[in-house]
Image (cartoon, rainbow, N blue to C red):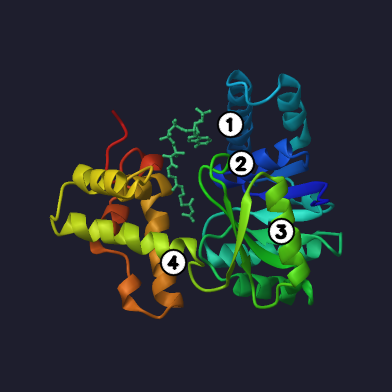
């Protein structure tokens, strides 16, 4: 059983918010840090809404909902993270931004056993850990990938990624924490895209090639994969749901990290991103969500 008492979540977006919510429900005190105040406000409202819904649906007692909400504090002050015993970073997929955060975490966290986890979906854990080590030598053994899936409260998996220098005890502690948060942990090594996105993203990319080549209409591509393979969502709708910019970015990481052009993003995917059609979050991707 994990003995984590206080968790810091860096980034109040959809992933960070989801992680904070399930941690609080599991009895852990959580500080959600985001430098952007409107993101903190939105995250607070989402927590209230989703937990109230869990009560309405009979999945949670009102007293447990109140207790979970009371465990979460929302802060724009970096120093409020100092005394956490577990940090999870869930900011934008940008290696430079993550390196900065991990070097700051390495010097901010006061507990010498605190774990520094990242929710990255494809960036090298070893590379992120190296930035922490430069700031404070020896920290890289406590850096690990803890990859959640969207929507976090619904999806059962946590993909654990062991960097080259991650301590085995930290892997075991991460698996115990994931289980305490109601998830099933499965471990992968640190190769571009890990397992989930190494397998998922080329499939989504191929659906864009099928669309670009006129193999079928978008509804037919999605319908064939939903009904024929029992997917909960077709690949094009799932790409919209994840964000087309994120999908293109992950394909670029695969192409670079695995040194193979076959992973390059489909030209149609790149074109939609260039047009600002990023999926659900902008109201339009492959499909239109504005009507
Ligand atoms: N946040 C919280 N809960 C959500 C949610 C969200 N954004 N979206 C849906 N849910 C909940 C709903 O509230 C609902 O719960 P209730 O029983 O309380 O109503 C439940 O999920 C089912 O939702 P719906 O009935 O509205 O719709 P559905 O049955 O079609 O399920 C879905 C929605 C769970 C999203 C389903 O379509 C699905 O599993 N899709 C695939 C999701 C997927 O593949 N995610 C992984 C993406 S890859 C990734 O995240 C990693 C990466 O690195 C890119």
CB under 8 Å between discs 4 and 2: no
Q: Quick check: marks 3 and 2 in contact, CB under 8 Å?
A: no
Give the mark nearer the N terminus: 1 vs 3: 1
Badge 4 element: helix
Indicate which disc, 3 or 2, sits on the residue closer to the N terminus: 2
Q: Quarter-wise, where is residue 210 in the image?
A: bottom left
Q: Residues within 10 Å of mark 3 (few under 14, many from 20)?
A: many
> Which of 202/244 is in front?
202
Query: x%, y% of residue 241?
Result: 40, 44
Q: Is residue 264 left or right of residue 144?
A: left
CB-based contact (under 8 Å), mark 1 and mark 2 = yes
How crowded pointer 4 is (Cα within 10 Å; few <14, some 14-19, many 20+) is rated as: some
Alpha-carbon distance for marks 3 and 2? 19 Å
Query: Would residue 15 be seen by someone viewing this image from the given angle?
Result: yes
The residue identified by callout 3 is 174
First reached walking from the N terminus: tag 1 or tag 4 = 1
Q: Residue at x 42, y 71 (%)?
A: 254
Residue on which disc 4 sits: 198
Q: Image quarter for residue 67? A: top right
Eye-nearest disc, 4 or 2: 4
The residue pinned by badge 1 equals 46
Q: Earlier in the sequence, mark 4 or mark 3?
A: 3
Q: Is residue 271 above or below residue 163?
A: above
Alpha-carbon distance for marks 1 and 3? 26 Å
User: For mark 2, what is the residue?
Assistant: 17
Regarding mark 2 in the picture, which secondary structure is present there? helix
Give the residue drawn at x 62%, y 74%: 126
Q: Are marks 1 and 4 in contact (CB under 8 Å)?
A: no
Local crowd size for mark 1, using a 10 Å CA cut-off: few (<14), some (14–19), many (≥20): some
Left or right side of 54 for 70: right
- Residue at horizontal 27 percent and vertical 63 percent from the top: 266
């Amino acid at each position: 059983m994990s003995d984590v008492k206080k968790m810091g979540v860096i980034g109040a977006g959809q992933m960070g918010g989801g992680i904070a919510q399930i941690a609080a429900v599991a009895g852990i005190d959580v500080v959600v840090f985001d430098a952007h105040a409107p993101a903190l406000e939105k995250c607070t409202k989402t927590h209230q809404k989703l937990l109230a819904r869990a009560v309405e649906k009979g999945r949670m007692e009102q007293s447990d909902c109140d207790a979970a909400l009371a465990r979460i504090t929302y802060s724009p002050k970096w120093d409020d993270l100092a005394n956490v015993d577990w940090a999870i970073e869930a900011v934008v997929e940008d290696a430079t931004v993550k390196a900065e955060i991990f070097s700051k975490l390495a010097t901010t966290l006061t507990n010498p056993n605190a774990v520094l986890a990242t929710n990255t979906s494809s960036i090298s854990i070893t590379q992120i850990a190296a930035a922490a080590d430069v700031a404070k030598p020896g920290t890289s053994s406590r850096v690990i990938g803890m990859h959640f899936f969207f929507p976090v409260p619904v999806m059962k998996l946590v993909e654990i990624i062991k960097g080259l220098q991650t301590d085995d005890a930290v892997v075991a502690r991460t698996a115990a924490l994931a289980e305490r948060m109601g998830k099933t942990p499965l471990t992968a090594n640190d190769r571009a895209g890990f397992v989930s996105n190494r397998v998922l993203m080329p499939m989504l990319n191929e659906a864009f090639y099928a669309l670009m080549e006129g193999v079928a209409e978008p509804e037919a591509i999605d319908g064939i994969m939903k009904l024929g393979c029992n997917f909960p969502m077709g690949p094009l709708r799932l790409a919209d749901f994840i964000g087309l910019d994120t999908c293109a970015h992950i394909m670029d990481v695969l192409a670079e990290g695995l040194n193979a052009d076959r992973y390059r993003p489909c030209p149609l995917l790149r074109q939609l991103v260039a047009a600002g059609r990023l999926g659900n979050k902008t109201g339009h991707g492959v499909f239109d969500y504005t009507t």
